[in-house]
Image (spheres, grey):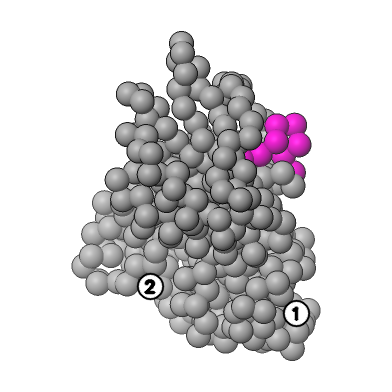
Amino acid sequence: MLADGGCAYSVCITIGPRVRAARLHKSLGQQLSELFHGSQVFNLMSYVPGNLHGSLEKGFLVLDPRCCPDTENRLYSILREYKQDIQLCSYREGEGGQVWQCWWDLNGGAKEIERSPVMRMDTVMPSPFVDNIKGSAVFYSLEDACAVLQESSTVIPEAKRVLELMDQNKIPERGHFSIIVIEGLDATGKSTLTESLTSHLKATLLKSPPECISQWRKTFDEETSLIRRAYYALGNYVGAVEIAKASQIGPVIVDRFWHSTAAYAIATEIGGGVHNLPDHHHEVYSWPDDLLKPDLIILLTVCDEERISRIRKRGLQETREEKELEANNIFRQKVEEAYRRMENPGCVILDASSSKETVLQEALCIIKKHCRF
C-alpha cells in the first residue's frame, strides 16, 4: 500500500460511550470519503493484543498513494474538531522496506510526537472481529439492546418511543400452540410459504420487526450499525409479545425472527470470507436466554441465480443489505453459513427451488415431524 513513496493515516475513535463513538464514526467516515476523492478510505479496527475485551476501537485508514503534502493539512482541518476523541497516526516506508508509525498530537496544531516500527503479528485468537460482535452487533439480552436505545434517545426521539412500547408490553407466558419461524434471504419464497402455511394450519401470521415499530424502520436504517442493530434486536422482543399472545389461541407462523437479525450482523462485522466466521458452536450463534424460543425454524434456500432472478422479475424493493448480497457473493455466503450455524434452536434446511405446492408439502412434513398439533 505504501509502494512508490505513498503514505497512510489511521484515525481511531477513542471515546468511551458506544452510541457517541458510533455516531462519530459514521460522521467521520462520510467526511473523509468526501474529502479524499483521489485517495482510498478503508474501515479500520484497532485493539490491544491480549486485552481485546473493551479495547476495540473503530476508525479509518486513509491511503495517499502520492503522499501529497496537503493531505495532512486537510486531515487536520477535519480532525481538530474531534481532537479529544480520536488518535491520528501516519505510516511511511523507510529503508529496507520497514514501515514506521508516527503518532500525532493535534493540540495546538498537528505534530509528530512518537515514532515506532510496525511489526507483523501472527493471527490473534480470539479474533477481534468476533469480540466486537458481542454487545455491538448482536445482542443477547433485552437489557443490552435497551441500553443502546436508551443512550440514543437523547438524539433520536424514535428510540424513546420503541422503549416505551417495550415497557408497556411485558412478554406474557407463551401458549401451548406451536410457533414456527420461516427464515431465508429475500426472494427465497418466504412470503408465499408463510401465507400458505397460515391458511393451511389456520394459524396467525406475524412478522419481525412487528408492525407497531415498523413505522420507524427507515429512521433506524439510516443510523449507525450499532443503533440499527439494537433497534432490530429490540424488535424481536417487542414481536415476542405478539407471538406469545397469539400462541395462546392457535399456531403461529413468523416471517423472520432473531436468526435473521444475528446472521446479517455477523456476516457484516466479520471481515473476509466464510473461513473467518466464528467456529461452529461458538456462543455468537446461540439464541438469547431471555427471548421467546420458537418450536421450529425453517430456513428456505434457493441457488443464487434463481434468487436474484426472482428479485428482478418481481420488482422487489431491496434493503441496503440485500443489495450488498446481490453485489457481493462473499457476503451472501457468510449470511447463509451464519444461518446454518445457528443453534439452540438450529434451522431445518428446505430447498425452495421447486413449485410452491411442493415446497408447502415438504414444509408440512417437517412441521409434522417437529411440532405437535
Say if residue 123 shows up in the picture. Answer: no
Quadrant of the rendering where the C terminus is positioned: bottom right
Looking at the image, tell me whether mark 1 or mark 2 is earlier in sequence order. Answer: 1
Residue for point 26% across, 63% down: 310
Kind of residue sitting beneath label 2: Thr
Residue for point 74% across, 64% down: 144
Q: Quadrant of residue 163?
A: bottom right
Left or right of 5 in this view: 171 = right
The range drawn in magenta is 44-53
Q: Nearer the viewer, residue 257 or 47?
A: 47
**Residue 269 appears at what percent x and percent y?**
54, 49
Label 1: element kind: loop
- Circles 1 and 2, Cβ within 8 Å, touching? The answer is no
Q: Nearer the viewer, residue 338 or 115?
A: 115
Residue for point 59% across, 67% down: 227
Q: Which of 82 and 332 is in front in this view?
A: 82
Residue for point 43% across, 59% down: 31
Kind of residue sitting beneath label 1: Ile
Main SS of residues in magenta? loop
**Looking at the image, is 214 positioned above or below residue 98?**
below
Q: Mark 1 points at which residue?
A: 171
Left or right of 27 in this view: 103 = right
Q: Mark 2 points at which residue?
A: 192
Q: Nearer the viewer, residue 6 or 312?
A: 6
Find the distance from the CA under tag 1 to the CA under tag 2.
29 Å
Comparing labels 1 and 2, the label whose residue is closer to the camera: 1
